Image (tube, rainbow, N blue to C red):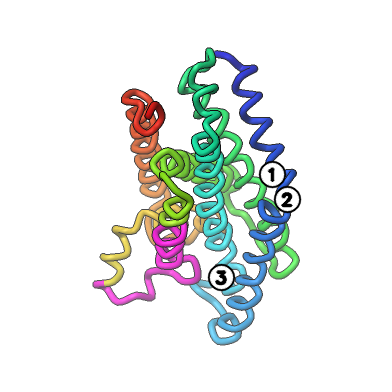
Amino acid sequence: MNLRAVQAIYTFEMARTGRTIWQSIVSPVLSTSLYFIVFGAAIGSRITEIEGVPYGAFIVPGLIMLTLLTQSTMNASFGIYFPRFTGTIYEILSAPVSPFEIVLGYVGAAATKSIILGLIILLTSWLFVPLRIAHPFWMVTFLVLTAATFSLLGFIIGIWADGFEKLQIVPLLIVTPLTFLGGTFYSISVLPPTWQTVALFNPVVYLISGFRWSFFEIADVGHAVSVGMTLLFLVVCLVTVWWMFRTGYKLKK
């Protein structure tokens, strides 16, 4: 493996975060904190507990996932789109760097940024509500798996998109609504039975449920099912990326 090439791509992408720190770090943290304050204060005054967990603490895993999903997707999509937009992607493709190393550099950097954001939000939430993490290992596992999976999704979007408008379509019109409907601010057990069944077709439900279980040992679906669904989505994204490089889809045109 060409570790120097991976390091070069990874370092460049991480340096871009430093140059746009307000957009990359400060803005998402402030936005999530506002969600926390508004929903925690406004709704929390009416809903004191959900399944024995204070409402303010209950929404923390969902808010972390909301940030993780959107930022992973957007960071990775912009990361690979700009080399395509400027034409420098051809320098990367002609260099002695394998597709695996390219993906590892870009996706690894995007996932790292998202994990850092998630941890910052987790630390910030302790300023507002007392939190406990029942299963730290599974919390970190879900955090890393989700960041890697949606960074791969973002990488796919960055290759697929042929304009800045398309870069925004999936994160804003698909990922964010699915996250809100996936139990970010509530448990799907409060929904009518029919809607509970419909909600189970939303893949984000399994991510939020598993992540929340690692904190409070409460879940809408079993944590083993959540891990399985996350791994399945990861495999689908990996196969899609492999196919894109195999066929040169929008990379060599």
Among numbered discs 2 and 3, the one appearing first in the sequence:
2
Q: Position of residue 186 (x, y in %)?
A: 46, 71
The three-letter code of the residue at mark 2 reads: Ile
The three-letter code of the residue at mark 1 reads: Thr
* Label 3: element kind: strand
Query: From what the image shows, is residue 69 above or below residue 101?
Result: below
Q: Position of residue 28 (x, y in %)?
A: 64, 59
* Label 2: element kind: helix
Decide if residue 81 is on the left or right side of residue 12: left
User: What residue is drawn where x is 58% and y is 14%?
Assistant: 2
- Residue at the disc numbered 3: 53
State how far apart marks 2 and 1 are (Cα): 6 Å
Query: From what the image shows, is residue 86 above or below residue 32?
Result: above
From where the camera sits, is residue 65 visible? yes
- Residue at the disc numbered 2: 21
* Label 1: element kind: helix
User: What residue is drawn where x is 61% and y is 17%?
Assistant: 3
State which quadrant residue 144 falls in. Answer: top right
Which label number is shown at residue 17?
1
State which quadrant residue 165 falls in. Answer: bottom left
